Image (tube, rainbow, N blue to C red):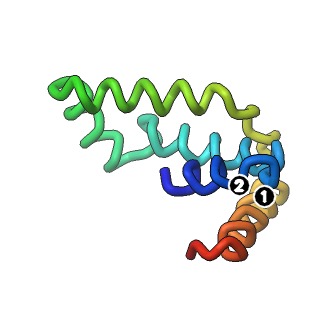
Amino acid sequence: MADLDEMLDLGEHATDEDRGVVRAELEHLLSPAGDDLWTSLTELLQHDMNVATAYAAVRQVLLLLPPAPPRDEAAALHAKHRWAEVRRHHGRR
């Protein structure tokens, strides 16, 4: 989530590839593939309207981002590394 905030703060300096990588990471995290987080999240989604509303808002923001780049493992690793460098250079670790 912090990556999404950081990327949105970068505005025009974030590339479509950056946006796609962040979208893919968050979609993975907020899905059944997210394992432990998903287990806790589904419980909260079913019992807390505020969590459900926030979850829906995040999903809507993710839809505004470009789709994830093709799943070429080398390209995906490079994109994740590139995004980590962007964050590092903007003071976030």
In the figure, 51 relative to 37: above or below?
A: above
**What number is the disc on residue 79?**
1
Mark 1 closeness class: few <14, some 14–19, many ≥20 residues within 10 Å? some
Instruction: Give how far across and how far down residue 9 sits, in percent.
Output: 64, 53
Type of amino acid at the residue the image marks with label 1: Ala
Q: Which residue is mark 2?
A: 10
In the figure, 29 relative to 65: above or below?
A: below
Instruction: Give how far across and how far down residue 20 sits, in percent.
Output: 73, 42
User: Quadrant of the rendered structure where residue 27 is?
Assistant: top right
SS at mark 2 in the image:
helix
Q: Residue at x 25, y 42 (%)?
A: 40
Instruction: Give how far across and how far down residue 33 sits, in percent.
Output: 46, 41
SS at mark 1 in the image:
helix
Q: Do we see residue 72 in this rendering?
A: no
In the figure, 82 relative to 26: above or below?
A: below
Instruction: Give how far across and how far down residue 43 sits, in percent.
Output: 20, 33
* Nearest to the observer: residue 43 or residue 8: 8
